[in-house]
Image (cartoon, helix red, strand yellow):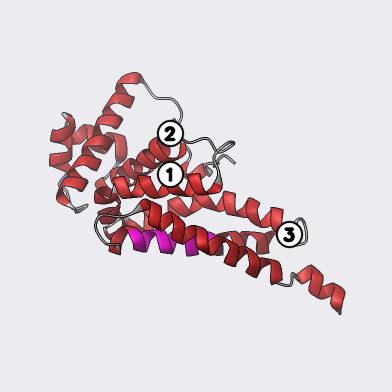
Amino acid sequence: MKLEFPESSAPAPPLDRRVRRTRSALMRATIDLVTERGTTAVPVSEIAEAADVSRQVLYQQFGDRDALLLQAALDLARRELLEGAAYDPDTMTERAGVLAMARHFAEHRGFYRPMLTGSCAFALNKTLTELIIPVNREVVRQKYGNHLAPELVDDLATFLTGGASAVVNTWIVEGEEPLDPEAFTDRLMRMTPVVTAAMGRSTTPHQEERRR
């Protein structure tokens, strides 16, 4: 199943090649500096210098540092996690998909940890949640068909996404060094049948109505 980007975080329309190179350079410099320093409090002047552009160009392209930080994180996730050569949602098993995710966050922990504890942590969590909710919404629909009201489907998808995000974020921020993607994948996979069984035992509003 392919992840569909919501409009609020969808890739921008095609840009001029020079503009694309500039944006890519700024995002790479941001990732490198945040990873190196372990903080998102990196001066705009240093990011611009590392990307070999002026501060004015940085502001023209992104507006401010937090916007650049957020776009750099989303670009990294899209390129390596969602659109990478190894990512094939049609053939990849569930465990392989979870392991690919865990390996990505483990490899780039030095960047994601300060992002998840820095100035744009809320915005990053919100945007990443928006990327995953459509997938969990489909999971809920497959489980219950058309028995649930659309608002309840959305609430359940948000609930599942938020719970999983909390576990992943805690692992990235507080997990022992070095992170172990295999062990974490096993940990997540052990929860899957428990959650599925709980959902299967749940009484839907439709079923409850029929009992009355």
Q: Residues within 10 Å of mark 1 (few under 14, many from 20)?
A: many
Q: Secondary structure at mark 1?
A: helix
Quadrant occupied by the N terminus:
top right
**Residue corresponding to mark 3:** 144
SS type, badge 3: helix
Which percent across, then down, holds residue 22? 27, 27
Q: Secondary structure at mark 2?
A: loop
Relative to 212, residue 17 above or below: above
Magenta run includes residue 163: yes
Q: CA distance from mark 2 to mark 3?
A: 32 Å
Is residue 25 left or right of 15 when viewed as pictured?
left
Q: Give the percent coordinates (x, y) of residue 155.
A: 60, 64
User: Reading the chain from its start, which is encountered first: label 1 or label 3?
Assistant: 1
Q: Which residues are magenta?
A: 160-171
Asked if disc 2 and disc 1 are in contact, CB closer than 8 Å, the reply is yes
- Spatial CA distance of label 2 from label 1 is 10 Å
Q: Quadrant of residue 145?
A: bottom right
Please, what is the three-letter code of the amino acid marked with disc 3? Tyr
